[in-house]
Image (spheres, grey):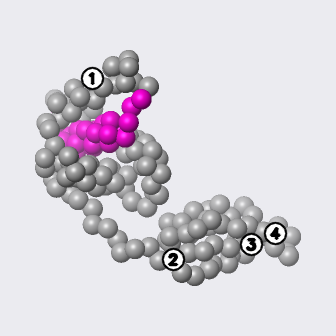
Amino acid sequence: MFEIRVICDRADADRITTSLNILFDTGAVRRSPSRTAGLERLYVTADHRPDPQTWPTPEQAYADAPCIADEIGWTVCVAGDPESYSELDREYFLRKAAVFDRIALSGDPDIPYGSDTETAHATAVYLMDLDHASVICDPRAYVRQQYAQWTKNQ
């Protein structure tokens, strides 16, 4: 573990903090004014990130997944149930993100939204936000990793 001190223009402080969070495993950023007008001091306790994780390929992640049509049916059924709609859980959002990822990967013109990678990306980002996961990877790779772990534990 080590401490980083940065003296920077106030306008750059958020960008620098974000960059440090991407590069290192950081704690809270402590800010204080610099002795020089217009500058700010940032103090960050940091550590090296653990070794990069291996991300499963789509084939590995979805090897045991039900067919796309069944997953679409499941998500529609759960979302359409008035009693469960207000209490949708992580499993719902994980499976929804995974099915959109699979649809985008398929490129099948017979499947609605077959080329819609934006929807797959958006649902993946939502899952990462729900999990409070740092955005240090491709959100769709995160969905694949989480889905593979989820199916392994079923």
Which numbered dot is residue 121?
none
Which is nearer the N-term, disc 1 or disc 3?
Answer: 3
Span of residues in magenta: 87-109
| Image quarter hosting the N terminus | bottom right
Say if 114 sits above or below 6 in the image: above
Q: Residue at x 17, y 30 (%)?
A: 69
Which numbered dot is residue 41?
3
* Label 2: which secondary element: strand
* Label 3: which secondary element: strand
Say if 50 sits above or below 78 in the image: below
**Magenta span: helix, strand or loop, mainly?**
helix
CA distance separating discs 3 and 4: 6 Å
CA distance separating discs 1 and 2: 45 Å
CA distance separating discs 1 and 3: 52 Å
| Residue 119 shows in the view | no
Q: Residue at x 72, y 61 (%)?
A: 11
Q: Type of residue at label 4?
A: Pro
Q: Type of residue at label 3?
A: Arg
Mark 2, residue position = 47
Q: Residue at x 54, y 66 (%)?
A: 21
- Contact between marks 2 and 3 (CB within 8 A): the answer is no
Which is nearer the N-term, disc 1 or disc 2?
Answer: 2
Which of 91/66 is in front?
Answer: 91
Mark 4, residue position = 33
| Residue 52 shows in the view | yes
Q: Type of residue at label 1?
A: Cys
Q: At which x and y percent is residue 131?
A: 43, 49
Left or right side of 46 for 6: right
Mark 1, residue position = 77
Which is nearer the N-term, disc 2 or disc 3?
Answer: 3
